[in-house]
Amino acid sequence: MKTSKALSFGVLLLAMPLLFLTSGCKKFLDRKPLRATLDDLNQGGIEGQVFGIYSSIKNYDNGQVFGGIPWQAMHNFRSDDSQKGSEPSDGAEWVAPFDNFQYVKDLWASNFYWDGHYALIHLTNTALQTADSLNLTSVNDKVNIAEARFFRAFSYFDLVRTFGDVPKIDFRLYNPSQANVPKAPAAQIYALIDADLQYAAANLPTEWGSQYPGRLTNGAAKALWAKTYLFRSNWSSALGLLQQVIASGKYSLFSSYYGIFKDAGENSSESILEWQNYVGKNRTDDYGSWYGTCQGVRAASSTGWNLGWGWNTPTAAFVNSFDAGDVRKGSTVLFTGQSDDPATGGYGGTLPATLVQPYWNKKVYADPAVRASTGYLDGAYWINQRVIRYADVLLMAAECLNETGSGSQAVTYVNQVRARVSMPALTYTTQAQLRADIKKERRAELGLEGERFFDLVRWNDAVTVLGPLGYQNKCRFYPIPQPAIDRSGGILVQNPEW
């Protein structure tokens, strides 16, 4: 139970009043501040606004964008590892576009995903303009500016890899019409991402200490920046950043794989970027998100197994992809009608045989004691979302080394990840073989964490792997939401293949 968070940075951030709704530009610009004005928050700097950005990225409204069902649809359902899940009649309209790649141009999920990202970008641009207008230049001010620029880069990276060319809005909006700009080439979006993350990496601290769990560090900036370079196959630039993260000595693999995803594993030595959630006893201090609840086991409340809404369930293909003896299978998947297996993170229960799905996401499996303490017996709102882990850094570094001809060094990073779960060490033979090994290792290590679909796309494997499910090359980018195009009056145009 995370009682120590009650007075922590995470809770202080979550308690910040939210300034804007997270829908379209016009909607969030027309909304009046809930409690405070920007002038109220500008006194002494922009820290108040920056804390509001942290809050916005995972609160119950915007949390759908960065961890809830729309995020799961874009980042997980489209892979071969998971599917919509839940009951067949629950969100049936999501199966065709996300499980079967029959993309829909006007759907709540994609509309909300688009609008929410631009709403967050608006918050970052407002904070940055405020800092500029006040001529804020102290060390603390630069940290706040770096935090805002990190979040802007984070949002744009999601947008550019999901939609391709998108509008570039890197200035504060004072009225809705200013947001009506044409799409910018992806190269320009990546140039903005590079500039923002370069500043963030240079000005964020290496660590914050226990007072500020989850607050951004230069390690997070470098890891995210490296990930953006992987999407451009810029192996050398990515590798340089990843080696800095590794050499910092600030991160290490957590002792047990399943332990990463328990309450005690939150903000562990493996955590590089993690969204903070908290619910106190009897639903006091409720600063949670939909991330855990939207994926929890779905059942009748009378069974005692109604842990959430049951979305993002593993596929048989994913379950069968693990090598024999890989404990990550039992640490990632709950099996209907079987024990939850305490040896891989269970609590000594047996799932009912009557559940509607055969498999469930064990990485958001709620501790029964915490459920009872919070009073949320049918949800898991307090579970932190692990966004970037050190294992991901090691595997990205291995990939970069292999692609630049240093396979014998690359395999040592892969073996660090495998050793944690007692899998036999690999031996380097050829670049092609290690490339295949790294792909398999990423699938096993990062399953159901939102990486697989985008990995397949950047590896140019998506047509081969996902083609039988309906994927075509044009599905690498989702169509621009039709409501956004309609609002633009012809300024914003649809992706050419759609």
Image (cartoon, rainbow, N blue to C red):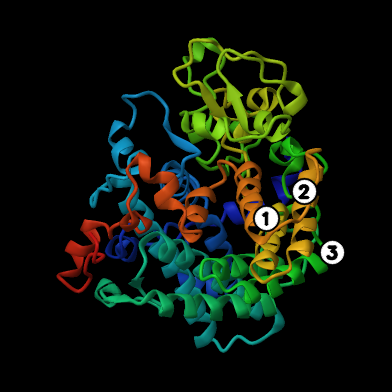
Mark 1 or 3 closer to N-term?
Answer: 3
Q: Amino acid at mark 1?
A: Leu
* Image quadrant where one finds the C terminus: bottom left
**Separation of disc 2 and disc 1 at Cα?**
9 Å
* Image quadrant where one finds the N terminus: top right
Residue 388 seen in the figure:
no
Residue 324 image point, x, y percent: 70, 30
The residue wearing badge 3 is 249
338 up-or-down from 317: above or below: above
342 up-or-down from 476: above or below: above
- Mark 1 vs mark 3: give the one in front: 1
The residue wearing badge 2 is 426
SS state under label 3: loop
Q: Amino acid at mark 3?
A: Gly
Query: What residue is shown at x 57% (from left), y 12% (from top)?
Result: 337
Mark 1, Cα crowd under 10 Å, few <14 / some 14-19 / many 20+, is: many
Residue 103 seen in the figure:
yes
Query: What residue is shown at x 63% (from left), y 76% (from top)?
Result: 237
The residue wearing badge 1 is 434
Viewer-nearest residue: 277 or 41? 277
Viewer-nearest residue: 279 or 100? 100
